Image (tube, rainbow, N blue to C red):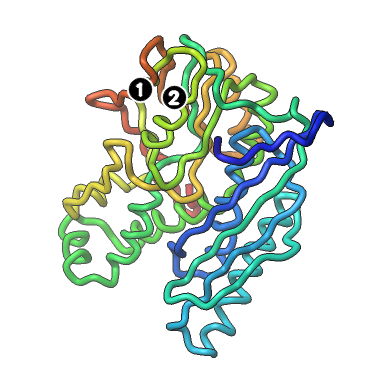
Amino acid sequence: MDSSVVPLGESGFSLVQTIDYFYPSVEDPYMNGKIACANVLSDIYALGVTRCDNMLMVMGVSTKLSEKQRDVVVPALVKGFNDLAHEAGTKVTGGQTVLNPWPIIGGVATSCSKDADIISPDNAEPGDVLVLTKPLGTQVAVNAHQWLDNPDRKSQLVKAGITREQVLRVYFRAMDSMTRLNRTGAELMHKHGSHGATDVTGFGLLGHAENLVQVQRRRVSFHVHTLPVIGHVPALLAATGTSFKLMQGYSAETSGGLLMAMSRKNAEAYCAEIEELEGYPAWIIGDVVEGERVVELSKNPKVIEVPSVDKPGELW
C-alpha cells in the first residue's frame, strides 16, 4: 500500500498514515513547499482517503545557504506547504527541521478513517481498464528548465527550433501539475467504483504499475497502451538525445497522478467528470487482463501530448 493502515481495535476505524520527502526540484521555494505537500497527500488519496486529519512537516535546511538566504527560503517553503495543506482541508501541527548538506522537504499525513472509506488497492479484475489522472514528464520538464543555463543543451534546443518560451511553458505546466491535489480524483474513486489505485511518483508509471499489479488478489496483468505526456516534452527529448526512460514508462515523476483500475464504463464516466470538475483531463491508458501479475507496455504506445496545441495566453 502507499500508506500504513492500522486497524484501531474493534472500532471500525483505521489509522492511515504516510511519510514522504524529496530534494526540491524547482527553483521557487514556495512552489517546492506546495509540491511537497501535494506529494505526501497523494499517498492517502491513493487509498480513496480524502480527509487528512493532521500533517507534520519534515525539512532539511541546506548548510550551503547563507543566513540571509535561509531567511528567505525557509519561510517560503513553510508557507507553500501550509497553504496547500489548508487547501486540502487540513493543518500542519508540527514536524522536524534539521541542518543538512542538501535541502529536503516533505512531511507526514495522518487520517483516522472508517474502514468502509478506504479503498483496498487489490481488487482489479480482468476486463477493467487503467486510468491516469495527470500527464507524465515532470522530470524532463524540470531538467529542461536547467538546460537553459547549460550552453551545450541550449544550443541543441535552439538548433531544433525550441524557444526559451516553449521550455518555460513546459516547466510551468509541470509545476502546475505537481502542485495540483489528487483529492478530487480520490473522491471520484468512490463514486465510480475504483478497484484499486496507486500514485505515480519516483518509480515512474510502469514501476508503480508493477507494484500495484503484484498485490492483486486475482491473477491479472496490466497492459499499458497509452502515454499522456506534457506537451513539447517529446520534442525536448529528441532535441537533446536524452530519454529519462519516459517512453519506456520509467521516468521518475514528482507528485504525479493517480493510477487506478475500474470497469471501462465507469472509467469513461470518471474521466468525463474529473475534467468537468477540475478542468484537467484524465485518460484510459491500459487494460487489465488475465495474467501472471506483470506489466507490459505496448511496443509502440500511443503518445498523447497534453495539450495537443498551445493556446495563446493559456498555460494548458
Q: Residue at label 1?
A: 294
Residue drawn at the location 59% of the way across and 70% of the way down:
77
* Residue furthest to the right: 11
**Residue 273, numbered circle:** none
Give the left or right position of residue 103, taking residue 86 as reference: left
Q: Residue at label 2?
A: 213
Q: Secondary structure at mark 1?
A: loop
Three-letter amino acid code of the residue under disc 1: Val
Alpha carbon distance from label 1 to label 2: 7 Å
Residue drawn at the location 40% of the way across and 42% of the way down:
136
- Picture layout, residue 276 above or below residue 165: above
Give the left or right position of residue 53, taking residue 245 as reference: right
Residue drawn at the location 63% of the way across and 76% of the way down:
75
The total of numbered circles placed on residues is 2
Front-lying residue, 158 or 151: 151
Image quadrant in which the N terminus is located: top right
Q: Position of residue 102 (x, y in %)?
A: 43, 72
Check if mark 1's residue and mark 2's residue have beta carbons within 8 Å: yes
Determine which quarter of the picture holds residue 165.
Answer: bottom left
Front-lying residue, 82 or 237: 82
